[in-house]
Image (cartoon, helix red, strand yellow):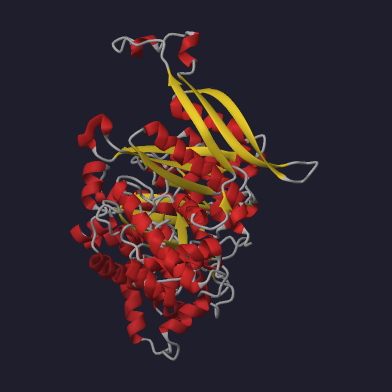
Amino acid sequence: RALFTVLQSSKLQHHRLQLHQPYQSTSMRALFTFLLLPFNNLHVDAFSPRNLGRLETRQPRGKSRLFTTTTTAESVRKTVDNSNNITNTASKEEWVTDSLLNPLATHYVKGPSEVLVFDTTLRDGTQGESVSASCDDKLKIAKRLSAFDVDYIEAGWPGSNPKDAEFFRRAQTELPPETKNKLVAFGSSRRKNVAVEKDPQIQALVDSDVPTICMVVKAHPWQVTEILRATREENLQMIHDSVEYLVKLGKTVLVDLEHFFDGYKADKEYAMACCESAVDAGASCLVMCDTNGGTMPWTIEETTHELVKHFEPFCTIGVHCHNDCGMAVANSITACHAGVGLVQGTINGIGERTGNADLCSIIPSLALHVNSTLSCQDKLHELTQVSRYVDEILNRSPNNAAPFVGQSAFAHKGGLHVAAMERNPLSYQHIEPELVGNEMRVLVSELSGRQNIMGKMREVFGSDMDESQKSDRSLAILNRVKQLENMGYSFEGAEASLHLMLLHTTKGYCPPFHVLDYSAQVYDYNMDSASRVVSNLNTDLKETASTARATIKVRTVTEDPDSFQLAYVDNLQVSDGNGPVDALAKALLRALLPSQPFLESVELIDYKVRILDPNSATEALTRVMIEFRDSKTDKQWTTVSVDSNVVSASLNALVDGFEYALIEHAQLCMLCDDAYEE
């Protein structure tokens, strides 16, 4: 209103308007362009609401005379107070909304109705302990995240290490356009006493050739003076110069306000000054960072309300939370509910110290419980797949207890729970697992009831079995399971062994092979324990020699090509290996492959041994769990066995694993003679 009144009273036409103390955000320039529509030949260069300074009007080029009018902020206020030319018929919301229709205006997003998803797995996530990704890994993950339809993919800090610089270079030719448009380069503001155009890491951001920059700045006065070793004023100027430079180059700039919540608590006015310096320079989003992860949800909510109210609708507010207090997901969702329009996080919550906010929890929570509109909403059923894909690429073991995407997220063990879920699956589930690409699992253990067993029987046999027969058999199997678990078995993580137990109780089931006998020999070429470590370093052929040999005799069932009759074939095989279990696995597979070539794609991916009773020393029972994978279908399964002889326990688990592969995945099932009625 002040500017409009001054211009009306000055009757300035056919002039160019330049406003000092630049306010470079495109949303404000769009707003004032709208307000100055009556002045058809007047162009707005810049404006700052914090300091009007002086107004200069210049004639168009080609005219020799420079006409200048100067006014102060005080004279503007007096003019406004005395003016009756401005009408109040249009509300603030109306003229702001109209101004933002200008194509120059920044897209403003406010939660919880709409939230943008900003993934920083490839940048902040890789700062986690034991997390590392090659450039090829990062390219693969970026493609998958883009296909999942996240809004932003922060891929690295090109000014900090050669790997990230290589990523952005290769991204220009190896990533599709839809993925490149989502890439974000991370960096910091210019260094103290260095011109922004001469700062190497600022230039690295420019050279990354991506449309969006995320710039981290200090928003805590103590961090500025003690860590950055700059004055408060220097920090504000560094923020403004860096953002303004990148905005003028056509970049969309998001500003990560490091230590924001701690800084806001220590000095609210300075924290807000940092925000205003960034917005004045043209930042599109202010990201409040809970860098130390110690902020509670109620503080997040209060601070978010104040910041959103202050900058609405000119700048979107975002949030970036760490999980040091276990509050990262709760804080992120609380912030979105309070008005945050952009949430940052990582897949599976990986990140520095205890991790970042987990997008695998935030995304479904916002979509299914908060009813937020997300760009990846239609791909929500792929969430579990994305989670496991990232773990696989980063060579991490998935967290089975992870909400929504973990293997145990919809697993039910207690008999009372399972009985209730037989009537309604949502009695003990907050959502249908299929919505996030997961599945419900019924676990069987000594805590199970008959309904658990009957549920597994339905999975194996379908609904054809007679109910009375099913009930009797389930009770017998349940008693057997409790007896075995009392010995040390655990069927919760070994569903393949449970599946086979159900099959072996079925009349007429005939296993596809039998192990008739086996033996294993272990030998060594160096029994001097004091020198073994040293001698193993020698480049001797013995270093890579096998240490065990296994012999196994297997009976398989094959079909005679001439008579088309089933026949038994015995096969004796010998194999060397790195230890007795490795030798047995190789010998067993060698014996089975002639009749079951399908097994060639089956591989062992994990082998675990646990001593169940350490006080029994070498006589203790040993539990062995082996995990298998079909390399063609990527399906996995686990078997278990318990024995005081670790070799025997291992062989039993191996036999179960290969038998399950033939029954479940090769669809091979033989019926013995007693399957048929007389």
Q: Is residue 277 left or right of residue 631?
A: left
In the rendered image, the quadrant that contains the C terminus is bottom right
Check the image and report above or below for 483 versus 600. Answer: below
Q: Is residue 651 left or right of residue 289?
A: right
Who's the residue at 37% across and 33% down the image? Answer: 646
Q: Is residue 474 left or right of residue 676?
A: left
Q: Tell which residue pokes out farthest to the right in this image.
A: 562
Looking at the image, which is closer to me, 333 or 656? 656
Which quadrant of the structure image shows residue 553?
top right
In the rendered image, the quadrant that contains the N terminus is bottom left
Where does residue 620 sit, x and y in percent of width and height?
27, 35
Q: Is residue 459 visible?
A: yes
Where does residue 624 sit, x and y in percent of width and height?
38, 39
How many dots with numbers? 0
Who's the residue at 26% across and 44% down the image? Answer: 230
Looking at the image, which is closer to me, 2 or 314? 314
Check the image and report above or below for 622 versus 358. Answer: above
Who's the residue at 43% across and 71% down the image? Answer: 431
Who's the residue at 52% across and 54% down the image? Answer: 251
Where does residue 599 sit, x and y in percent of width and height?
61, 40
Where does residue 474 sit, x and y in percent of width and height?
42, 64
Looking at the image, which is closer to me, 270 or 327? 327
Q: Is residue 393 visible?
A: no
Looking at the image, which is closer to me, 191 or 13? 191
Check the image and report above or below for 306 versus 487. Answer: below
